Amino acid sequence: MQGFASEFNSAMTLILNGDAELWAIVLLSLEVSIFAVLISALIGMPVGAALAVARFPGRRILIVLMNALMGFPPVVVGLLVYLMLSRSGPLGVLELLYTPTAMIIAQVVLVTPIIAALTRQVVELLAEEYSEQLRSLGVSRLASVPVLLWDARLALVTALLAGFGRAIAEVGAVIIVGGNINHVTRVMTTTIALETSKGNLALALALGAILIGIAVAVNAMVSTLSLRAEQEGLRHA
Amino acid sequence: MRDLTLQLASCLSVDGMRITRKGKALLDVPQLILDGPGPTLILGPNGSGKSLLLRCLHGLIVPDRGQVRQDGVELNADHKARQAMVFQQPVLLRRTVASNLDFVLKRQGMPRSTRKSRIEELLTEGGLDGKARQSARSLSGGEAQRLAILRALALDPETLFLDEPTSALDPNATQMIERMILRASTRGVRIVMVTHDIGQARRLAADIVMMQGGHVVEHGAAKQVLDAPKSDAARRYLAGGLVT
């Protein structure tokens, strides 16, 4: 118990003293995950919105597939991205393996289905409400997509935060394609795994505390925004 | 003699319209011509096909058979662009009051410089001055419906369809909306409105379409339909009797 208390104290000291190595890892984690979420949003939001408003054969199957991809095992995603980026893979010439870009790609693959599926749900509900009014105003299905995305913005920020939560806490895929290289691809989750195995619990605990802090902050934001979105809906009901 | 040019220019007609679901005719209107100068009110019990007829007239629902014509021509995109509709439950964008109006004006291609003054004009018209920056969703029921009507009027429509716009409102809010409708009618906007309220029909209508079971059972001048209805269904409805 005394050992734990001592490690915990060391961890807090690392955080409070602004340990350069620790904060470099935190910064890289945030950079990778924020980039990944932004790219995922650019892909996932229009795709989710299009699936919500468009009607075409096979739409249901696509929705089921997209929902299933939300639960895709990260290590499998890591393996697939690894195969794509490895020297003998189709994208091997880009030499992206073991770089932060590779980690971003893996996180994009993991997060895009989450953002797309949540966007589809949110936009479909709103489209039901707006459908007749927008048609009456002469807004086509295609033109209704930006209108719906804008009006669902509160709920969509929640989707982004959910995607960010998944990305920042991800370990399996990024360790495969990033390689956990010191000062290059070492992020919070992979460092925690490595440092724990080495017995350097202070750094692992410090990163764990920051990760938990980020998770709590993200969840608090999701909760606040969900409540606001719900109130917006109720006010009009 | 009536000016035939004017009459044709504002003529909305239905020809052989039929909508059937599971073998039951939800709407069966062989012919209906709306060419009077004042507001047309569609009256009838629940499930009589009033809202369905209104949606067909506006092109939101395509009937299984028959067609809607404006000025003798089958309803097309140009006609629809000169129509607007207000629904029973106002559907407002999750934006400010002014943004709801701006959305429509922008789509109309109105330049930014003139949009602001037009929005102010419209807000004054609807008694919503000072609420421009307020969230549209925080408006009261009456204010929300007035904003929905203003947004429809911002389209500068030739025809305005209203589906029971006052059914959930108190008398004061109803009166404000009726005034807006009458002012629009006076400016030359053709009003076609669904209502349950016989008193409202008496206050607003120039002519009345009485519906029952998906059929038009009577259509004529408001005074004639309300005071001397020809059909049994209309007589019973106006007398407050149960009509099925």
Image (spheres, rainbow, N blue to C red):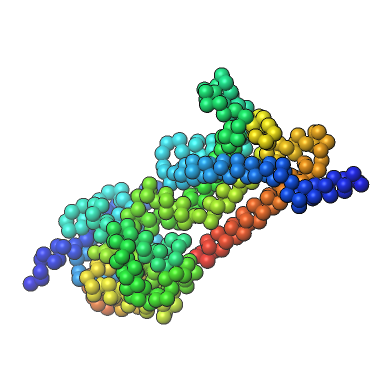
Q: Residue furthest left?
A: B1
Comparing B109 with B220, the one in front is: B109
**Residue B15, image x and y in percent?**
22, 55
- In the depicted structure, whether residue A77 falls above or below residue B141: above
Comparing A32 with B12, the one in front is: A32
Q: Quadrant of the N terminus of chain B?
A: bottom left
- In the depicted structure, whether residue A141 falls above or below residue B170: above
Q: Could you tell whether A91 is left or right of B112 in the image? A: right
Q: Residue furthest bottom?
A: B172
Q: Could you tell whether B207 is left or right of A64 in the image? A: left
Q: Is residue A47 visible?
A: yes
**Residue B106, image x and y in percent?**
33, 59
**Which residue is at a point 57% across and 61% down the rendered structure image?**
A228
Specify the quadrant of the image occupied by residue A163.
Answer: top right
**Residue B98, image x and y in percent?**
40, 67
**Residue A45, image x and y in percent?**
49, 45
Specify the quadrant of the image occupied by residue B113.
Answer: bottom left
**Which residue is at a point 66% across and 56% down the rendered structure image?**
A220
Q: Quadrant of the C terminus of chain B?
A: bottom left
**Which residue is at a point 30% across and 54% down the rendered structure image?**
B59
Comparing B106 with B64, the one in front is: B106
- Number of on-image labels: 0
- In the depicted structure, whether residue B175 falls above or below residue B155: below
Q: Is residue B51 visible?
A: no
Q: Residue furthest top?
A: A88
